[in-house]
Image (cartoon, rainbow, N blue to C red):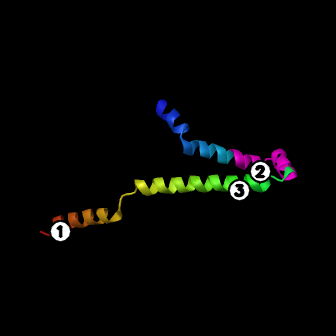
Amino acid sequence: MSAIWHDRTRRSARGTRHADYLYRLASGTHAAKELRLFGLADWVIERFRARRQRLLELRWNATRLRERPLIWSVLLVLAANLLVFGR
């Protein structure tokens, strides 16, 4: 249970909730009307764009860190084939 709680309190999870809040704020009928009325629409949209871009960068970096270099996999398969078929 604590691992789930820790995952939900990470910065990226909070960033996701904040970006979702900004999206709902800009797209909801009453809130969007007030944003346009007070001239805050551009500000909210820019904050949403910046948050989403940061989240996508974090996700991209995490994916890149999990991937193993392809060359090692190719060399392993090549060595196994040479071992089996080289006799």
Q: Give amino acid for label 2.
A: Ser
Check residue 85 in the rendering and tell me which mark sits there, or answer none.
1
Check residue 46 in the rendering and tell me which mark sits there, or answer none.
3
User: Decide: marks 1, 2 in contact (CB < 8 A)?
Assistant: no
- Badge 3 density bin: few <14, some 14–19, many ≥20, Cα 10 Å: few
- Badge 2 density bin: few <14, some 14–19, many ≥20, Cα 10 Å: few
Residue at coordinates 15% horizontally, 70% vertically from top-left? 86
Check residue 27 in the rendering and tell me which mark sits there, or answer none.
2
Give the residues in magenta.
Answer: 21-37
User: Decide: marks 3, 2 in contact (CB < 8 A)?
Assistant: no
- How far is the residue under mark 1 from the one under mark 2? 62 Å
Answer above or below: position of 9 versus 42: above
User: Decide: marks 1, 3 in contact (CB < 8 A)?
Assistant: no
Q: Secondary structure at mark 2?
A: helix
Question: Can you give x and y, in whole percent of width and height, for residue 24 in the image?
Answer: 73, 46
Q: Secondary structure at mark 1?
A: helix
Sequence order check, earlier mark of 1 and 3: 3
Magenta stretch contains residue 50: no
Image position of 37 (left or right of 57): right
Answer above or below: position of 36 versus 73: above
Q: Give amino acid for label 1.
A: Phe
Check residue 72 in the rendering and tell me which mark sits there, or answer none.
none
- How far is the residue under mark 1 from the one under mark 3? 59 Å
Q: Main secondary structure of the magenta part?
A: helix
Question: Can you give x and y, in whole percent of width and height, for residue 67 in the image?
Answer: 40, 57
Residue at coordinates 57% horizontally, 52% vertically from top-left? 55
Magenta stretch contains residue 32: yes
Residue at coordinates 24% horizontally, 67% vertically from top-left? 78
